[in-house]
Amino acid sequence: MAQPIISTTNLARTFGKTKALDGVSISIDEGMIYGLLGPNGAGKTTLVRILATLIPPTSGTATVAGLDVVRHSAKVRKIIGLAGQFAAVDDFLTGRETLEMVGRFYHLSNQEAKKRAAVLLERLSLADAANRTAKTYSGGMRKRLDIGASLIGEPKIIFLDEPTTGLDPRTRAEVWDIVRDLVKRGSTILLTTQYLEEADALAQYISVVDHGKIVAQGTSSELKNSLGQDLVEVAVEKDLQSQVQNILSTVAGQPATIDEITGHIRITAKEGSATLLAVANALKAQQITVHDIALHRPTLDDVFLAVTGKPTVKEQTKQ
Ligand SMILES: Nc1ncnc2c1ncn2[C@@H]1O[C@H](COP(=O)(O)OP(=O)(O)O)[C@@H](O)[C@H]1O
Ligand SMILES: [Mg+2]
């Protein structure tokens, strides 16, 4: 196996009495999108800032491309790009000027900075707005410009800290396309998010963080599977419920349950869609009219609730 491109061991960071990170060990393979999913205040930005060499850890170690982030911070900085939660965008510069200026921070020649800025403006669909000051940009445009600024040095490793927080769904989808495109070009991405759908849609591997600790880890389906089996759920008229409960119990070989609130009847789907078919056939044989019949997988929301005790973010949280 190749060495992980990012690795942390028991990483901890305190601010006064706050344990922002409390012993985090992660390992990220080259070329993947790694999702760090957690609510506000979980410690996501603290982890990103340590990996980006902006702050040192209180204890534990972290390496990026085999380089210790404390001892080799200058070298690490050269190979990473960071797009922060609070867009580092200057209102009074145009999009083009912003990217060219950041390019010069990376010690690119004027000519090279101009060339890369033009390519990025095109790729991020900002070419038409390139010569307008950022103060006229929408939230989504600023986020894209901020991501552009993190890419001008052509880093292999990119940290995207809540790149879509506060964006409307359409603009969020645009940012998702940019992220997928980056990975196709061979980058490794550490993405933090408060949104399950985002981790689910983009990340090959997800760590759920809460109170500075990793509380669950795995691929999206592993996390969902960890909550147990699929369910078949049937909705019928109230006066048919107990009859349907008997039918489903027979199919499942164990008692079906009736949800107290919805009145839906449920069994565990040991054989997935085959169980769904068996239920449908048994109901049809008894000529039962159903309102709805469905196979349910646990969602990442269920996982989140189970491991953090908190429901997930549905509303866009203001930071
Ligand atoms: N510079 C700081 N000074 C004091 N407390 C901080 C600082 N940075 C972060 N914290 C605290 O550390 C915890 C984790 O914060 P953060 O890493 O920003 O979480 P997230 O990015 O997941 O929202 C929070 O309780 C936050 O208030
Ligand atoms: Mg944060």
Image (cartoon, helix red, strand yellow):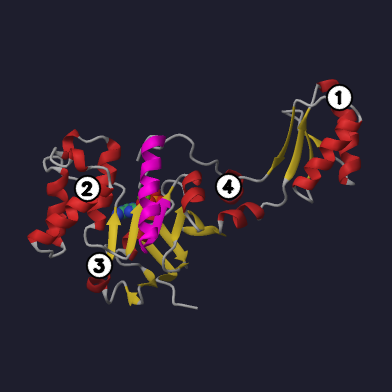
Q: Which numbered disc flags the more N-terminal residue, 4 or 1?
A: 1
Report which residue position mark 3 lands on. Answer: 77
In contact (CB < 8 Å): disc 2 and disc 3: no
Tell me the magenta residue range.
169-192
Q: Which numbered disc flags the more N-terminal residue, 2 or 1?
A: 2
Report which residue position mark 1 lands on. Answer: 240
The Cα–Cα distance between marks 3 and 4, rounded to whole angstroms, is 34 Å
Amino acid type assigned to the residue bearing label 2 in the image? Leu
The Cα–Cα distance between marks 1 and 3, rounded to whole angstroms, is 66 Å
Amino acid type assigned to the residue bearing label 1 in the image? Leu
- The 10 Å Cα crowd at callout 2, few under 14, some 14 to 19, many 20 or more, is many
Magenta stretch containing residue 112, yes or no?
no
Label 3 beta carbon less than 8 Å to ligand 1: no
The Cα–Cα distance between marks 4 and 2, rounded to whole angstroms, is 35 Å
Label 4 vs label 2, nearer the camera? 2
Report which residue position mark 4 lands on. Answer: 300
Which mark, residue 15?
A: none
- The 10 Å Cα crowd at callout 1, few under 14, some 14 to 19, many 20 or more, is few
Amino acid type assigned to the residue bearing label 3 in the image? Arg
Q: Position of residue 266 (x, y in %)?
A: 78, 38
Q: Which numbered disc flags the more N-terminal residue, 3 or 4?
A: 3
Relative to 206, say whether 265 is above or below: above
Q: Position of residue 182 (x, y in %)?
A: 35, 57
Report which residue position mark 2 lands on. Answer: 121
Q: Secondary structure at mark 2?
A: helix
Q: Position of residue 288 (x, y in %)?
A: 86, 26
